[in-house]
Image (spheres, rainbow, N blue to C red):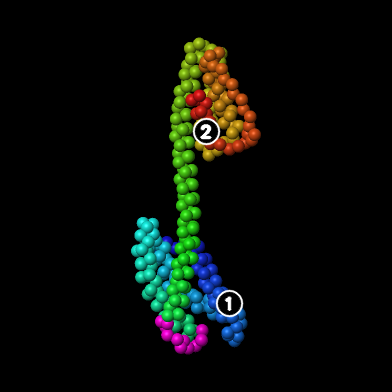
Amino acid sequence: MRFKPWHIGFWAIYVLLNALVNTAFAGTTDLSFSPLWRLLRFVFAEVVVLPPGLLAAYWFIYRLVPRYFYSKRYAQLIGRSLLLILPLIVLNRVLTFYVVFPALYGEYPTYSVIGIERLLYAFVDLLSAIGLFSTVQLLLSRQEEKQRQAELQQEKLESELRFLRAQTNPHFLFNTLNNIYALARKQSEHLAPVVLKLSKLLRFMLYECSTATIPLEREIQVIRDYLDLEALRYNDRLQVDFEVNLEDPETAIAPLLLLPFVENA
């Protein structure tokens, strides 16, 4: 059974709410105590009878639900739950009869410890503990599962981006070296500018691609440098129309997110 910090807050609120309800129902039947003192007395009573509720709630949510609810064996879930609750009902009544009542009133009650009405009251008390705790636990578990799925999706996306970058860097470098080789054979005057642009692009890949995001404007500049290199390689054989209209140049994107589309165009 996994105990979490929020459980303490849940059971504290549960005890307090039950005590408030009991105080309200008690009304003015006992005017020998102040309202605050009556509330504290009922808080004490709720704390004493809380262990059966704790056992029922934790056993139900951490043992019965995983075993029977998720496998859709509902009949077995109900049967096992009743087997769990029945002895705890008796324990609830014993604690009330032999601990709570003497502590609050200085004597044992005149009614039977296992009267039908009292047993039904204990049954409802245990059901409320199971129902409320299970509802909160399942809602939080669902929220945690959604968060876990979102994290897995993010990790998958980052993995795909890393794979894309791993493909882009060697491919881009290979193409650019081919450009330089072609220019060197021609002893072209464009060789120096090409080497300079390549140096800038390699600096970008080495030092800026390791960050999670970069400004969109920076990615556009990388694309421009790449297109300049390609233009030098192909001379008049390459016609490129590249227009940019950015509403927000500082928009953050993953590095090298757009360049592969340009390379493969």
Outermost residue on the top side: it is 186
Q: Is residue 67 left or right of residue 199?
A: left
Residue at 52% across, 66% down: 9
Q: Position of residue 45 (x, y in %)?
A: 50, 78
Q: Which residue in the protein does label 1 denote?
A: 24
Side of 243 where 124 appears, left or right = left
Image position, residue 43 (x, y; %): 53, 76
**SS for dot 2:** loop
From the viewer's side, name the closer residue of 159 and 125. 125
Q: What's under tag 1, amino acid-wise? A: Ala
Report the amino acid beneath label 2. Leu
Give percent across and percent down for residue 205. Answer: 51, 31
Residue 112: in magenta span: yes
Q: Nearer the viewer, residue 53 or 128?
A: 128
Residue on which the image places disc 2:
257
Q: What residue appears at the point 37 percent right and 57 percent down from the top-left corner?
A: 72
In this rendered view, identify the residue nearer to me: 30 or 186: 30
> Residue 160 occupies which quadrant of the picture?
top left
Q: Quadrant of the N terminus?
A: bottom left
Q: Which residues are magenta?
A: 104-115
Q: Determine the main secondary structure of the stretch shown in magenta.
A: loop
Q: Quadrant of the rendered structure where residue 92 is?
A: bottom left
**Visible in this render: residue 5?**
no
Task: Tell me the SS state at disc 1.
Answer: helix
Residue 54 inside the magenta-drawn segment: no
